[in-house]
Image (spheres, rainbow, N blue to C red):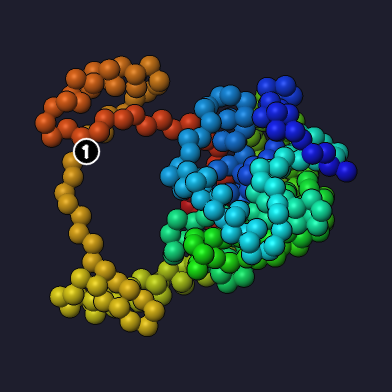
Amino acid sequence: MSRLLTRDEALGWTREHGQRINAGDAAPILYESPFDSPYQLWLRKTGRVPAKEQTPEMQSGNVTEPAIFAWYEQRTGLKGQSQVWMAYEDAEFIQAKADFWHPESRHLAEFKAPTKDDSKDHLLAKEGQVPYHYWLQCQHLMNVFGVEQMAFVSWRAADDHVTVEVPRSDEFWLFTMLPAYMEFQHRVEENAWPKPQGQCEEQSEEWAMHARRRMEAKAMIREAEFRLDRAEAALKRMADNGCKTTRGSGLRASWVEYKPRWEAVIKAENKAGLDAIMKALKPLGNKQGVGEIKPREYPPALFLKFTAENDED
């Protein structure tokens, strides 16, 4: 069975035992995250780049979570526990933290708090489908906590929420997630990421199937983009009627005016160059008409570029 971690053990795990894999790491490790990649995650876990700063959306979720927890207790009639850490029985570096856990009934729930009512993930959940990167988190949680299903909750307010029941997929866990986790953890422990070299010929049916699906999907995207462009152009012509906002048939179109702005872009060749630039620009911070001066740093990246074999590049 998986092992319940004490709060002190969970907080001190990285210091005492090294890096762990949490539910939020599932999508990046499997190349399924819209925000991250396995290589970028590896850079952070090996200390090559600093941890990500919390976004306003993440900060909002931290503030909202206690309210969702209280609402969920009232809705289910269960007195649950929050921020419960569990370690996977066969590999304790695989861990999970539950937003809601009721040990007696083994009821598990994951909370998400989208900040916008038109959030793509929230709308998808309201259609009964868990966004895929969150589905992966749920699979991680269920396997670590040892439950057959769990609740995914997307909550904006007491009158704008949805709960989707998610079943566990043992096959996906055993044959896709666990092998990827083991390989990623090996790279963390070895403190090395293999450098791609040479060329490989992939002849498997699985590769052929996904290659075909990708080409079909790209064709569908081109068709959808063409239709979207034509529809939006027609709507823009109709909305050019003197009104700031035009509403109808479930669609609201509003004109948004942007004021002019001016920026200066200075590129640095390395960190020392960036520091020198920021030091030189510091006296300008108090000048009239000068806005915020802040550096931007882009960590190393490793991307897989897809091209059809008949493409020129």
- Please, which residue is most extreme toward the right here? 1
Mark 1, other Cα within 10 Å: few <14 / some 14–19 / many ≥20: few
In this orientation, which residue lies closer to the viewer: 34 or 253? 253
Residue at screen point 60% across, 36% down: 41
Report the side of 178 relative to 264 (left or right). Answer: right
Judged from the image, the secondary structure of the residue bearing numbered disc 1 is loop
Residue 34 visible, this orientation: no
- Name the amino acid, label 1: Glu
Residue at screen point 52% across, 70% down: 220
Report the side of 21 relative to 284 (left or right). Answer: right
Residue at screen point 65% across, 58% down: 73
Query: Picture quarter containing residue 266?
Result: top left
State which quarter of the image contains the N terminus.
Answer: top right
> Which residue is tagged 1?
263
x then y, percent, for residue 23: 67, 45
Query: Picture quarter containing residue 13?
Result: top right
Residue 174 visible, this orientation: yes
Count of numbered circles in the view: 1
In this orientation, which residue lies closer to the viewer: 209 or 191? 191
x then y, percent, for residue 181: 74, 40
Report the side of 299 relative to 276 (left or right). Answer: right
x then y, percent, for residue 110: 65, 54
- Please, which residue is most extreme toward the left here? 288
